[in-house]
Amino acid sequence: MTIRDWQAYLAGYLVLSISGDDPAAFLNLALARGLRLWDITRTGKGRIQVKMPVSEYRVLRPLARASHCRVRIVDKRGLPFFNRRLHGRQILLAGVFFFILAIYILSAFVWVVDVQPEKGPLRQVTPAQVVAAARAEGLKPGTRKGGIDTRTLERALERRLPQLAWVGLSFHGTRAEIRVVERVAAPAEDEYEMPASIIAAKDGVIKQILVMSGEGRVATGDTVRQGEILISGLILPPEPEKKPDEPLQQQQPRPEPRLVRARGIVRARVWYEKEQEIDRRQVREEPTGRQQQTIIIKTPGRQYVLRGPAVPPYSYYRQENRVYALPSWRNFPTLVELIISTYREVRVQEQALGYDEAVRTAGQQALADLKAGLPAGTLITGEKVLPLSDAGARVVRVRAWVETEEDIGQVVPLQGQLTPGGSPAVPHPGG
């Protein structure tokens, strides 16, 4: 609020509705008399709404008669009217005072302890174990925030839970948030040498393949399907050379295949597609800049409006609520809440999109959704949008494609033993 708004609130002001054949003539007369008017808005044909100080209201009657207008008080606002509403409600006023005082006092304590993993779900510890460790170190509901040394508590939790690599503590109101990162155990050395193949994680067209170990099964330009082997960990030995004059009994036996861990890079062109539709009749909301605020004290079964309108003041609006409540204790629910509702008026407009604009808008939405779902670091090499509806359709449907270049290799371990037929058992990628 500006200084003028605070001055008007302390002195009290009126919200007036002025209607007649020529409200502008009324405004000209009022301004010529030096009256203070602000927030002048047109609310309809031959009707305007203004705000003015209470002390100047008596001067309006002759001006209204002279301009043939009717003046009606819509609302009375400010501290004087607020005090009149509270007259005879001392218990309510005392309740509001103690409510604010209780919020101020209780905000100095921790009432909720949350655990927030920084990198994915926890695997080595549970949130309950972290909360229990924090409780053992003195952080629990009811603890005064001023008596907690954040850094000391973080170190204590790291010592108490060696599975954690990092602990961070922060306060958000009456909530203490413990952010944790688990230690990543180094894989066993033999895991790097376990027999494995590299398969296609998704469909695509091979653009580049680099085999560092194993046996390549595809070449540049090949089309592969998800689950197809790209680099095999099974290396088949060459066929033994046969000599025409050598007896069959003396021919050398065929060597056994070797199992290795396949390593390499397989980059491929991959396509993603999505269909999107959009209604050509669009309803848009445009803020008018007008807003009003309501302050409510809510108790079980009843609520009291301390300031502002009791019902939404606009036909079309967006509502934002801020709720302040005393923390619940054990099995006792919160009995009193302070609710601040802000109503922001919007103007609803219906707009008909042209066919080309609808195709472009739907295509942009589909492409944005596709790009948002791509793996990190994916190189986008092309995109395309194709309309599926004709120009006369009310609902326009399009299909969008995004072309990428990415590494599609996925390591799948082998069992390390050959089947009776001489081939290793390869588990299904999803198994």
Image: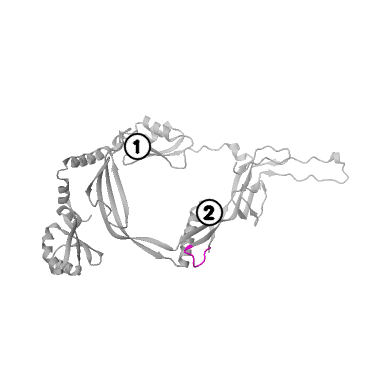
The quarter of the picture where the N terminus appears is: bottom left
Specify how the rendered protein is coloured: one colour
Q: Closest to the observer: 262 or 420?
A: 420
State yes or no: residue 77 in magenta: no
Residue under label 1, please give it: 112
Q: Exactly how many numbered labels are in the figure?
A: 2
Q: Three-letter amino acid code at disc 1?
A: Val
Q: Is residue 263 visible?
A: no
Q: Position of residue 367 (x, y in %)?
A: 49, 58
Provide the residue span drawn in magenta: 388-395
Disc 2 secondary structure class: loop
Secondary structure that dominates the magenta span: loop
| Structural crowding at the residue carrying mark 1, measured as other residues with C-alpha within 10 Å and reported as few (<14), some (14–19) or many (≥20) | some
Q: Is residue 58 visible?
A: yes
Q: Is residue 327 above or below residue 221?
A: above
Residue depicted at x 64% and y 40%: 414
Residue depicted at x 11% and y 60%: 58
State yes or no: residue 392 in magenta: yes
Q: Closest to the observer: 132 or 23?
A: 23
Q: Position of residue 65 (x, y in %)?
A: 13, 67
Residue under label 2, please give it: 378
Disc 1 secondary structure class: strand
Using the numbered discs, state the Cα–Cα distance from disc 1 to disc 2 in whole angstroms: 41 Å
In the picture, measured across the screen, residue 366 lies left or right of residue 75, that is right
